[in-house]
Image (tube, rainbow, N blue to C red):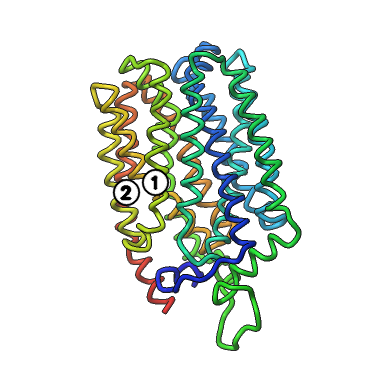
Amino acid sequence: MPLLNKIGTAAPRPTAPDLRRLRVALTVFFALDGFVFAGWVVRIPAIKEQTGASASQLGLALLAVSAGAVITMTLTGRLCRRYGSLQTTVACGVLLPLSVALPPLTDSIVVLGLVLLFFGAAYGGISVAMNSAAVDLVAALRRPVMPSFHAAFSLGGMIGAGLGGLVAGHLSPTPHLLGITVVGLAVTAVTAPVLLRDGAADRLREHSSAPDGGPRGPRPADTKPASPKAHRMDPRTRGLVLVFGLIALCTAYGEGAIADWGPLHLEEDLHAHPGVAAASYSCFAFAMTIGRLSGTTLLERLGRTRTVVGGGATACVGMLLGALAPSTGLALAGFAVTGLGLANIFPVAVERAGALAGPGGVAAASTLGYGGMLVGPPLIGFMADWYSLPAALTSVALLAAVAALIGFATRHTERTERTESV
């Protein structure tokens, strides 16, 4: 079984300096991803007005983000296996900031859709590449630190949304998103050398595949290497990866919904100021960051099943409040509770898929998960036209409850892994 199955019983081990540097650099890329994505989502209302799109037309344009991301995710797993997850992360770290400057340059919904196809491709590529590298690093560190990487994503999103709220009333989307491009390229240029340093990928593989979590040495005769088996996609492994991907889908759907439609809900349904409306995603991202920063402790104390079930139930209650509250303050509180609930479900799902099947598992689970994050907003756009936006947002609560139920139904897999790891 994968090395990660022994996380709960292994004693803390010293972390090699090269692994610490890789962890910091990879954390920066997660934060950059969240920062760029948030910069885009807080300007969606302005770009919607700029193009004159209806809710359903905007939903179709957002579907292009989904299409680009899903297509790229299916290919990025292969790129990671061929060229390395660290190298692929850096390449996508250049493409993502470049792509975010394009949406405000459009003047029609058709051109916007084409531009968002490219943005979605870059976003999907960096998502799979970063998570693949993070799974290897988690195995090397032998602690369930996956939530800390996603905490960086949420923190980047909170900063990006907060800055977006501050400048929304003063800058048009064009200079705002162009500034994000400059910042993103600068961060990539400073951080990339750590990931591209000679031997970095080899050291990561050595630590993650070593039986004791340290550098690989002579292997005892009765010790089986973990990596080949862990990365073999037999029917049972493939089924489990799909289950974890479904859990990720149910929860990421909510993150995408709040990111893309939360500001519109506050602005159009609750008549909030544009700056306050932009803060909806910031509140959500801040709560998610807090939840993910405590995620390692929760996983070590409660285990994966209780973390997933409790998080899904909390998110369900929070989103019902966020969608149906009669005031802006209560809606913001609901978004924050939702963020706390969803915080650690997606990282757990992707980590387990990657531990079972390597980059292919990460790609499969991420395709489903981020597919939910990116396909959800267009679906909500259609439901908003058919019913209302508050009613459409309640679908987030429904899927959070489904994630909790799936987590409870698959609780035996965690027990089985613990038994086999002894």
- At horizontal 38% and vertical 21% (from top left) the residue drawn is 276
Q: Disc 2 versus disc 1: distance between alpha carbons?
A: 7 Å
Q: Amino acid under label 2?
A: Gly
Observer able to see residue 178: yes
Circles 2 and 1: CB distance less than 8 Å? yes
Left or right position of 120 against 54 = right
**Residue 231: percent from left, percent from top:** 57, 65
User: Dot 2: few (<14), some (14–19), or many (≥20) neighbours within 10 Å?
Assistant: many
**Residue 273: percent from left, percent from top:** 38, 15
Local SS, label 1: loop
Q: Amino acid under label 1?
A: Ala
Left or right position of 226 against 95 = left
- At horizontal 60% and vertical 47% (from top left) the residue drawn is 74
User: Dot 1: few (<14), some (14–19), or many (≥20) neighbours within 10 Å?
Assistant: many
**Residue 26: percent from left, percent from top:** 59, 50
* Residue position marked by numbered label 1 in the rendering: 343
Local SS, label 2: helix
The mark nearer the N terminus, 2 or 1, is 2
Observer able to see residue 247: no
Left or right position of 169 against 390 = right
Viewer-proximal residue, 53 or 170?
170
Q: Where does the C terminus fall, quadrant-wise?
A: bottom left
Indicate which disc residue 148 carries: none
Viewer-proximal residue, 364 or 43?
43
Query: Within the image, what quadrant is residue 61 found in?
Result: top right
* Residue position marked by numbered label 2 in the rendering: 311
Please count the marks in the image: 2
Query: Within the image, what quadrant is residue 81 found in?
Result: bottom right
- At horizontal 47% and vertical 64% (from top left) the residue drawn is 143
In the orientation shown, which residue stands out farthest toward the left? 326
